[in-house]
Image (cartoon, rainbow, N blue to C red):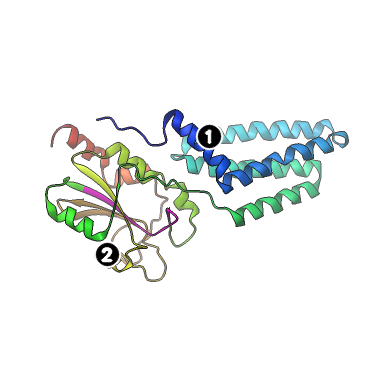
């Protein structure tokens, strides 16, 4: 069973480069960091070797922290968000050595970027199917489809899964479900996603309350032969994910490795 990973290989690098140029979030950050070069050049006659030493130290520290995050983070979005945060901190720190007014300038610029642009989420679905509640009900009752269905019930705005606190966590984890669908989809297990923003009246059918915010979203439900067997977060009114949604968390909670082995062994 071989499935082509979306966004992988050389095509993924081209797609990310195009995204950096076209997306306001990445473009504004690029311009903000690039503006340091002319400022640095104009201030060169008035700076000492101490500034160069601090720049070198900041650059090496940034590389070290980025390398650690590259190993630890599961998604590209999480790695980029953390790397940009470190870059901002180090740039402001170096600017303080040059002139405190330059540091204030970058603080203002990054604040404006934060207000104007949001990091884009991963918009592809992998092999997951976008379903309506009626379509899911038909698939579960049909009996001719896969034995298991793992369904994500969420509230989408511009393809971003929204929860009650901030959407930054949702952007960081937006790639998890599609990538799991690519890895684990087979004739035994299928993946689907339902946008409760389009069908809010159907939330109660899935045991989800939209009252008092959206603390239960996104909710992941595993069906076996049309019957719910597991869900995350747990089934009660005030349920809310206490841990960030990761591929490892979902994989362990729904025992996706076991289901994949069952498929391989023909169970």
Q: Earlier in the sequence, mark 1 or mark 2?
A: 1
Q: Dot 2 surroundings within 10 Å: few (below 14), some, or many (20 or more)?
A: few
- Of residue 14 and residue 213, the one placed in the foreground of this image is 14
Residue at the spot 60% in from the left edge and 32% down from the top edge: 63
Which is the main secondary structure of the residues drawn in magenta?
strand
Q: Is residue 157 magenta?
A: yes
| Span of residues in magenta | 149-161
Residue 236 position (above or below residue 138): below
- Considering every residue shown, the one lying at the far right of the view is 46
Residue shown at 19%/47% (left/top)?
A: 148
Q: 111 above or below 95? A: below
Residue drawn at x 14%, y 56% is 141
Q: Secondary structure at mark 2?
A: loop
Q: Which residue is mark 2?
A: 207
Q: Kindly tell me whether residue 227 is visible in this rendering.
A: no
Q: Position of residue 128 (x, y in %)?
A: 30, 46
Q: Would you name the residue on which mark 1 appears?
A: 68
User: How far apart are the two marked residues, 1 and 2, measured between alpha carbons?
Assistant: 40 Å
Q: Secondary structure at mark 1?
A: helix
Picture coordinates of residue 62, whole percent (x, y) = 62, 35
Q: Classify 225 as above or below 196.
A: above
| Rendered-image quadrant of the C terminus | top left
């Amino acid at each position: 069973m071989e499935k082509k990973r979306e966004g992988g290989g050389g095509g993924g690098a081209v797609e990310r480069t195009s995204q950096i140029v076209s997306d306001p979030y990445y473009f504004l950050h690029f311009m903000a960091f690039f503006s340091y070069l002319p400022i640095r050049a104009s201030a060169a006659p008035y700076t000492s070797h101490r500034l160069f030493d601090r720049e070198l130290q900041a650059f090496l520290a940034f590389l070290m922290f980025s390398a650690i995050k590259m190993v630890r983070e599961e998604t590209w979005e999480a790695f980029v968000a953390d790397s940009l945060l470190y870059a901002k901190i180090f740039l402001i720190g170096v600017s303080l050595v040059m002139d405190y007014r330059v540091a204030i300038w970058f603080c203002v610029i990054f604040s404006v970027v934060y207000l104007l642009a949001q990091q884009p989420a991963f918009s592809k679905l992998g092999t997951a199917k976008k379903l309506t509640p009626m379509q899911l009900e038909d698939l579960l009752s049909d009996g001719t489809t896969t034995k298991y269905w793992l369904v994500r019930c969420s509230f989408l705005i511009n393809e971003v899964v929204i929860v009650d606190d901030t959407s930054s966590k949702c952007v960081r984890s937006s790639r998890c479900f599609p990538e799991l669908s690519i890895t684990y989809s087979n004739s035994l297990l299928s993946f689907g996603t339902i946008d409760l923003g389009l069908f809010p009246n159907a939330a109660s059918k899935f045991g989800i309350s939209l009252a008092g915010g959206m603390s239960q979203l996104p909710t992941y439900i595993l069906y076996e032969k049309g019957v719910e067997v597991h869900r995350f977060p747990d089934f009660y009114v005030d349920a809310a994910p206490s841990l960030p949604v990761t591929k490892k968390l979902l994989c362990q909670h729904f025992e996706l490795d076991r289901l994949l082995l069952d498929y391989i062994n023909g169970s």
